[in-house]
Image: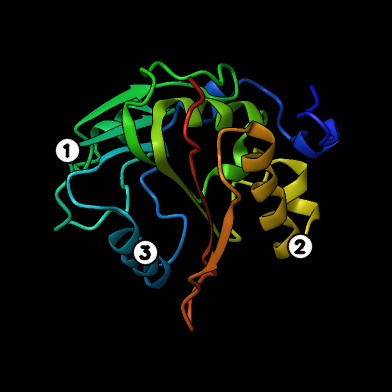
Amino acid sequence: MSEGPLPAGLFARVDESDDGLFYGVPRLVQHIDDTTIAALTRYYADAIAPGARVLDLMSSWVSHLPQNLELEVVAGLGMNEAELRANPRLSEFVVHDLNRAPGMPFAEARFDVATIAVSVQYLVHPVEVFRDIARVLVPGGRLIVAMSHRCFPTKAIRAFHELGAGDRVRLVASYFHLAGGFEDAEFIDRSPDRGDPLWIVTGTTKERSS
């Protein structure tokens, strides 16, 4: 399946088997190092207002949100129930496979912020997913996509193996544009001096037409 003007081959994977099989085993591991986790947490502290309703997409056992940031809701959507239950930051969660069903089981305009932390490389229908993220965010809501250079290689899309860092960032920025509903995406480099890189692509949702 093609993502609009993006070639379908970009989204092929080494392992095309059911993702539920791969993610069915809990993996309580970190996907970036401690220094880069701290940098992401600092960015969230700058970008997310107290009292916000946050949707943590492709969530796991840790969300990297600041501990002292009081939020109205932190809803997690992920693939493994045990991991989600182990995440103390989540106020609610749902087990849901975005590669099988890009549409999410949330009401329109339910959230102020959505986050995808070091997981966007696993989406095989990213434009459809981003389109539905725009639906569940309020107008003026923000999607924050944090990226680095680590991945589960057999489940990452071909583009993340073959493109350099700059082109990967541009590819993710194109998801915002092609999905519609977002203002132009912004790129922010929050890579620490020592540690894994941290590239952030973020965009806000447009006002909805009446």
Which of the numbered marks, if any, corresponds to residue 43? 3
The image quadrant that residue 14 belongs to is top right
Q: Nearer the viewer, residue 39 or 28?
A: 39
Seen from the viewer's position, the closer of residues 81 and 103 is 103
Q: Which of 176 and 167 is in front in this view?
A: 176
Give the colour scheme of this rendering. Answer: rainbow
Q: Which amino acid does label 1 sit on?
A: Glu
Look at discs 3 and 2 and give the one toward the viewer: 3
Residue 164 marker = 2
Measured from the top left, where is residue 197 in percent x and y? Answer: 55, 69
Tell me, yes or no, if residue 140 can be seen here.
yes
Left or right, 123 with respect to 188, comes to right
C-alpha gap between disc 2 and disc 1: 38 Å
Q: Which amino acid does label 2 sit on?
A: Gly
Question: Dot 1: what SS?
Answer: loop
Q: Where is residue 177 in the image (x, y as percent from the top left)?
A: 67, 41
- Tell me what residue is drawn at x 25 percent, y 40 percent: 87
Instruction: Residue at 79%, 29% (x, y): give it.
Output: 4
